[in-house]
C-alpha cells in the first residue's frame, strides 16, 4: 500500500474516532455536572419527577441496600449477611429454585431492619427520612420539550411507521395495550392525544366508529401521515397541546394517549387534563415508556426523553383524582419479558374518573412556554445530542432480536 493510501486510511480512522468521541464526551460531561447542564440548557425550569418524591432504586441498588440492612438486623454479622446476599443474587438469575428461600429470608430481614432507623427517629422526635435518594431538582432530557419534539418528529415522521414501530410498537402490542381501555361501544366518543401518524388510532377504530374519534397532536407532519390512512378518513384531526386540551370538561368517554407522555414537560399536568375532559365514569389509558435498570440504557434514556418509573405513572393518575388505577406491562415478544433496557412502549396505565368536573389537583403555571424565544445555538445543540441518544434505542430492539434468535427458547436472554 502506498504512503498516500496509508495516510488516508489513518485520517479516516481519526475522523471516525472524533465523530464518536465528541458527542459521547459531551453527553457524559453534562450528565454528570448539574451546573454545566443548567447553564447549557439556558437555566430553564423543569418539573421534578415525582415532585419532591423518592426515586425507586434499581435492582442492583436494592441488593446493596438489602445487604446493609441484613447486616444491621443481625448486629453486624458479616458471614450471615454474605450468605443471604449470595442466595439473593442467584435467585435473581432465576436458575436455582432451591435458593429462592434465601431471597424471601433476606426480604424479611429488609422489612424488619427498615423499622429500626424509622423507630429510632420517631422516638427521638425527628422526621423519618426516605431510604431512597430523591431525583435531582432538575432532570432535563434533551428532547423532552415541545419545540425539540416538534422538529424531532419533523424528520422522524418520514420513517416512523416503517422504522420505529416495527421495533417498539407492533400491532399485537397495540391491541394488547388498548384492551384495558375497554372500548366496548362503537358510539363512544374517544380522544387520541398525541396520536401522531394514527397507528394507535387504527387500533381504536376497530372498536369505535371513526367519526367519533378525534386525533390530536402538536406535529402537523405526523398528522399528515394520519390523514393518508383510509380507515381514519372520518376521524377529526386537529393540532393541539396535551397539557392544554381544546376540549370542554366532561367531553369524552375514553381518553387514549400512546407514545406521547415522554415529550410532556409536565406529565402531571397532561394527566390532569385527561381527567378534566373525561365524562364521569370515563376511562383514561396512557401507554408509554418505562425506565431502564441497565446502566448504559439509563444514561441514554436520561439524555433523550422522559422514561417514567411504573410507580410514577400510578402516582400521577392518583394525584389527578383517578380511581381504580391499574398498570399492565407490555413489550415486544422477542424481548422475552426483559425490561432492563427500558421500553419505548412498556406499560398501559388506566384509571376511571369518579366525579364530574375538573380534577381536584391544583397546579401552578405551565413548565414550558413555547412562545418564549430560544437561543438557536442552545436549541440546535440540545436537539443534536438528544437525537444521538435516541439512536441507541433504535439499536436496542435489533440487539434483543439477535439475542432472541441465538439463545435457545426457554432460557433467559
Image: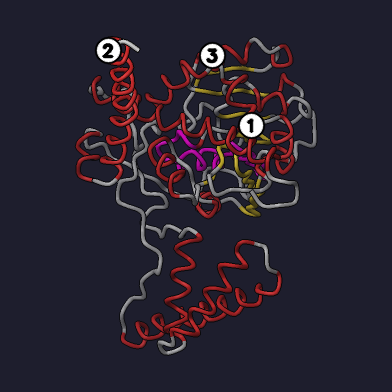
Which residue is under mark 3? Answer: 158
- x%, y% of residue 21? 30, 31
In this rendering, is residue 132 above or below 260? Answer: below
- x%, y% of residue 385? 34, 29
Indicate the quadrant where residue 232 lies.
top right
Q: Nearer the viewer, residue 397 or 143?
A: 397
Residue appearing at x 36%, y 88% in the figure: 123
Q: Nearer the viewer, residue 187 or 339?
A: 339
Residue appearing at x 75%, y 51% in the figure: 410
Q: Give yes or no for residue 240 being in the magenta stretch.
A: no
- Indicate which disc, 2 or 1, sits on the residue closer to the N terminus: 2
- Indicate which disc, 2 or 3, sits on the residue closer to the N terminus: 2
Residue numbers of the magenta segment: 262-289
Residue appearing at x 59%, y 17% in the figure: 237
Q: Give yes or no for residue 263 being in the magenta stretch.
A: yes
Which residue is under mark 1? Answer: 169
SS type, badge 3? loop
Q: Nearer the viewer, residue 258 or 156?
A: 156
The span from disc 1 to disc 3 (Cα, nearest Å) is: 16 Å
- x%, y% of residue 23? 31, 30
Q: State left or right for residue 136 relative to residue 331.
A: left
Which residue is under mark 2? Answer: 3
Q: Disc 2, disc 3: CB below 8 Å?
A: no
Amino acid at each position: 500500500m502506498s504512503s498516500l493510501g496509508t495516510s488516508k486510511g489513518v485520517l479516516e480512522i481519526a475522523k471516525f474516532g472524533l465523530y464518536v468521541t465528541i458527542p459521547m464526551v459531551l453527553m457524559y460531561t453534562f450528565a454528570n455536572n448539574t451546573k454545566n447542564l443548567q447553564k447549557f440548557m439556558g437555566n430553564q425550569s423543569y418539573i421534578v419527577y415525582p415532585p419532591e418524591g423518592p426515586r425507586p432504586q434499581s435492582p442492583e441498588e436494592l441488593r446493596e441496600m438489602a445487604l446493609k440492612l441484613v447486616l444491621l438486623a443481625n448486629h453486624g454479622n458479616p458471614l450471615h449477611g454474605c450468605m443471604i446476599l449470595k442466595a439473593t443474587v442467584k435467585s435473581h438469575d432465576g436458575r436455582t429454585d432451591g435458593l429462592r428461600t434465601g431471597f424471601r429470608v433476606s426480604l424479611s430481614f429488609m422489612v424488619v431492619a427498615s423499622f429500626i432507623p424509622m423507630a429510632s427517629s420517631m422516638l427521638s422526635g425527628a422526621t423519618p427520612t426516605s431510604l431512597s435518594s430523591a431525583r435531582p431538582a432538575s432532570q432535563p432530557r434533551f428532547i423532552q420539550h415541545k419545540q425539540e419534539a416538534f422538529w424531532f418528529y419533523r424528520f422522524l415522521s418520514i420513517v416512523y411507521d416503517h422504522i420505529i414501530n416495527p421495533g417498539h410498537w407492533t400491532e399485537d402490542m397495540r391491541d394488547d395495550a388498548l384492551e384495558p381501555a375497554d372500548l366496548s361501544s362503537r358510539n363512544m366518543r374517544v380522544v387520541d392525544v398525541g396520536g401522531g401518524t394514527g397507528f394507535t388510532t387504527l387500533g381504536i377504530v376497530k372498536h369505535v366508529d371513526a367519526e367519533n374519534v378525534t386525533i390530536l397532536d402538536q406535529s402537523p407532519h405526523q398528522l399528515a401521515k394520519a390523514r393518508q390512512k383510509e380507515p381514519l378518513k372520518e376521524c377529526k384531526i386537529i393540532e393541539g397541546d396535551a397539557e392544554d386540551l381544546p376540549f370542554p370538561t366532561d367531553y369524552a368517554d375514553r381518553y387514549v394517549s400512546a407514545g406521547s407522555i415522554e415529550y410532556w414537560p409536565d406529565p402531571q399536568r397532561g394527566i390532569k387534563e385527561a381527567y378534566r375532559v373525561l365524562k364521569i365514569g370515563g376511562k383514561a389509558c396512557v401507554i408509554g415508556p418505562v425506565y431502564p435498570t441497565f446502566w448504559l440504557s439509563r444514561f441514554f434514556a436520561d439524555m433523550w426523553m422522559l422514561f417514567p418509573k411504573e410507580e410514577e405513572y400510578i402516582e400521577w393518575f392518583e394525584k389527578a383524582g383517578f380511581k381504580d388505577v391499574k398498570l399492565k406491562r407490555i413489550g415486544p415478544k422477542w424481548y422475552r419479558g426483559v425490561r432492563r433496557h427500558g421500553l419505548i412502549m412498556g406499560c398501559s396505565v388506566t384509571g376511571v374518573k369518579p366525579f364530574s368536573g375538573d380534577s381536584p389537583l391544583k397546579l401552578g403555571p405551565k413548565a414550558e412556554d413555547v412562545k418564549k424565544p430560544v437561543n438557536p445555538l442552545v436549541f440546535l445543540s440540545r436537539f443534536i445530542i438528544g437525537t444521538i441518544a435516541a439512536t441507541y434505542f433504535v439499536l436496542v430492539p435489533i440487539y434483543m432480536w439477535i439475542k432472541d434468535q441465538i439463545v435457545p427458547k426457554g432460557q433467559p436472554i
